[in-house]
Image: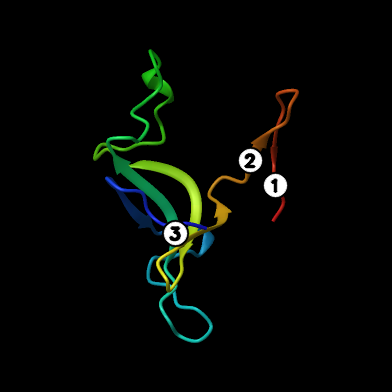
Amino acid sequence: MGGPCVNTEYKLMDVPEMNYKAKDLDEEGRPAPRGEMCIKGFEVFKGYYKDGGKDEGSNEEGWLHTGDIVQINCNGSIKIIDRKKNIFKLSHGEYVAKKI
């Protein structure tokens, strides 16, 4: 958990296929925004060196889509609760999907 960095903008994007929305509420009816964390700022990754084809994580407005699903707590801290793509690479190079 942690809070935003200085000089960096953050926003949540809805992920309807995973049922995460920026307007979600917790069990007690209080705001508990959840969604994909997107970041933008001077310190943020601008692209792969000499390989623009891999820059699928950002869009035309300069927002980097992290793939992390986060929840913003009532004290303003950010907690990672899921991944948009539940796929990871094993040490020998094979990609596997995480069962949910």
Residue name at image x 52 percent, y 58 percent: 1
Residue pointed to by mark 3: 35
Above or below — where is 27 with respect to 22?
below
Which of the labelled discs sits on residue 87, or is there none?
2
Q: Is residue 46 left or right of residue 16?
A: left
State yes or no: discs 1 and 2 in contact (Cβ < 8 Å): yes
Above or below — where is 88 with respect to 16?
above
- The CA distance from mark 1 to mark 3 is 19 Å
State which tag comes first along the sequence, 1 or 2. 2
Residue neighbourhood size for the residue with mark 2, other residues' Cα within 10 Å, grouped as few (<14), some (14–19), many (≥20): few
Residue 26 percent coordinates (x, y): 50, 78
For label 1, the SS is loop
For label 3, the SS is strand
Query: Which amino acid, by three-letter code, is at mark 3?
Result: Gly
Q: In this view, does 97 lie to the left or right of 3?
A: right
State yes or no: discs 1 and 3 in contact (Cβ < 8 Å): no
Residue neighbourhood size for the residue with mark 3, other residues' Cα within 10 Å, grouped as few (<14), some (14–19), many (≥20): many
For label 2, the SS is strand
State which tag comes first along the sequence, 1 or 3. 3
- Count of numbered marks: 3
Residue name at image x 43 percent, y 82 percent: 30
Which of the labelled discs sits on residue 98, or is there none?
1
Residue 76 percent coordinates (x, y): 40, 66
Query: Which amino acid, by three-letter code, is at mark 2?
Result: Ile
**Foreground pick, 97 / 2:** 2
Residue neighbourhood size for the residue with mark 1, other residues' Cα within 10 Å, grouped as few (<14), some (14–19), many (≥20): few
